Image (tube, rainbow, N blue to C red):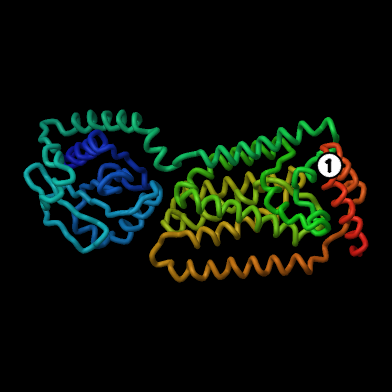
């Protein structure tokens, strides 16, 4: 056991204990040579403590910048990174976003760092038994890291208020659909009445709002549970990365675009579920993985594969789920992910993505007017929905719907 490795852990413990930093796992880096810490509220949001020579930064600069960007993206912050080297070399200032400091028990390359972290030089202590000290401080670090787990988790997932509200809406509508069984025993009739994507009503009564409402409607319990589970685990991370406003815009946009794909690309089927929005969030995460280069992490790729498999099984076994809706949501998510990305070298790509999204909207609107897949029509279903609206004392709407659908039937061949 080298003395420098103990000093590195002593510094890490100081940042954990005195400055509320938390250790971040960045993948395959060996713990004895490099440790990464993050605190979005710190003067330096990301800190690397390493026993590597400062000269290695010249050859490893690309990885350092990519890792820094990934960690800062994880905790949703920006700023400079502090790289502390346990060595007595002179510090380098070649990388503008990385502040480098060399430190040993009797040496500090840049005294100005003490203005931010005055305890830094007093932290390093000599030891007679490096292995014993290494084991003791490792245990202390594990304890303090566990105590701060909930706080560091909040940096990653953020406030779940938006997630809870959207989940509450989906669950509330599901319970409402079950309450309506006393008025109609048909799940299909109830789904259409509550806002499912149904081509006859979209074109016949101009109910284009169904492209949005269908995303919050689930009539199958298993479909609801799987979607809510996926949304609960995927949504907070995307909201933290992109911010609440961009998260909501992207989720709702993916739902609408996914529904538009299902409306135009399929026959007169009935579609429900937030799956298109979930695939939109997955598309955004896919873009973010490339933006931060975390796509190379096997765990990240494993998560993508797992989500794809789960949703593919859902499409296969749950009725009224459209694969076109999933595809449209994913495409929308990729576009929104590019538009709301933060990578400086992607400026032109962001502009192109905005233009692509506008063109996609125009194309979808145009395709709705030339859509010929309007059959089969189902007068019996339409009549049952109208009758359900009347039972709910929505007679004015039921009468308007009945008249417009009757006129629509005259135009469908």
Q: Residues within 10 Å of mark 1 (few under 14, many from 20)?
A: many
Place of residue 165 in the rendered image (x, y in percent of width and height, measured from the top left) = 57, 39
Viewer-proximal residue among 214 and 147: 214
- Secondary element under disc 1, as helix, strand or loop, is helix
Residue at 26%, 42% (x, y): give it.
32
Looking at the image, is 296 positioned above or below residue 179? below
Q: Is residue 349 left or right of residue 93?
A: right
Relative to 319, 336 lies left or right: left
User: Relative to 370, does residue 32 appear above or below in the rendering?
Assistant: above
Q: Position of residue 242 (x, y in %)?
A: 46, 52
Residue 36 at what x, y percent from top left? 30, 45
Residue 48 appears in the picture as rendered: no
Q: Which quadrant of the view contains residue 219?
A: top right
Q: Quadrant of the C terminus?
A: bottom right
Q: Is residue 114 left or right of residue 16?
A: left
Quickly name the residue at label 1: 389
How far across and how far down the image is residue 353, in percent? Answer: 53, 67
At 26% across and 36% down in the image, what residue appears?
16
């Amino acid at each position: 056991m080298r003395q420098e490795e103990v000093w590195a852990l002593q510094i890490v413990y100081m940042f954990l204990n005195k400055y509320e930093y938390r250790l971040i796992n960045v993948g395959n880096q060996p713990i004895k040579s490099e440790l990464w810490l993050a605190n979005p509220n710190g003067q330096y949001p990301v800190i690397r403590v390493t026993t590597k020579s400062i000269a290695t930064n010249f050859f490893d600069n690309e990885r350092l910048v990519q890792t820094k960007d990934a960690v800062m993206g994880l905790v949703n912050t920006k700023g400079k990174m502090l790289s502390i080297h346990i060595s007595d070399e002179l510090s380098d200032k070649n990388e503008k976003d990385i502040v480098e400091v060399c430190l040993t028990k009797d040496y500090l390359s840049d005294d100005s760092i003490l203005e931010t972290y005055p305890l830094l030089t007093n932290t390093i202590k000599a030891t007679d038994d490096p292995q014993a000290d290494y084991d003791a401080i490792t245990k202390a670090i594990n304890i303090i890291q566990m105590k701060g787990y909930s706080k560091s988790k909040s940096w990653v997932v953020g406030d779940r208020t938006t997630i809870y509200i959207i989940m509450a809406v989906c669950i509330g509508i599901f319970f409402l659909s079950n309450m309506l069984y006393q008025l109609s025993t048909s799940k299909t009739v109830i789904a259409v009445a509550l806002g499912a994507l149904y081509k006859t009503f979209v074109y016949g009564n101009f109910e284009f709002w169904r492209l949005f409402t269908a995303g919050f409607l689930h009539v199958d319990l298993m479909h609801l549970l799987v979607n809510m589970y996926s949304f609960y685990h995927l949504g907070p991370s995307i909201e933290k990365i992109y911010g609440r406003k961009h998260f909501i815009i992207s989720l709702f946009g993916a739902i609408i675009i996914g529904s538009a794909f299902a409306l135009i690309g399929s026959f007169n089927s009935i579609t429900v579920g937030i799956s298109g929005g979930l695939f939109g969030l997955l598309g955004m995460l896919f873009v973010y993985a490339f933006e931060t280069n975390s796509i190379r992490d096997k765990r990240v790729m494993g998560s993508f594969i797992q989500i794809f498999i789960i949703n593919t099984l859902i499409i296969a076994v749950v009725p009224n789920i459209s694969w076109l809706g999933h595809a449209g949501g994913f495409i929308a998510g990729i576009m929104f992910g590019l538009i709301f990305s933060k990578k400086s070298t992607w400026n032109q790509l962001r502009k192109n993505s905005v233009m692509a999204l506008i063109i996609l909207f125009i194309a979808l609107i145009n395709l709705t007017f030339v859509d010929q897949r309007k059959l089969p029509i189902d007068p019996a279903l339409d009549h049952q929905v109208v009758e359900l609206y009347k039972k709910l004392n929505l007679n004015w709407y039921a009468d308007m719907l009945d008249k417009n659908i009757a006129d629509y039937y005259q135009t469908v061949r």
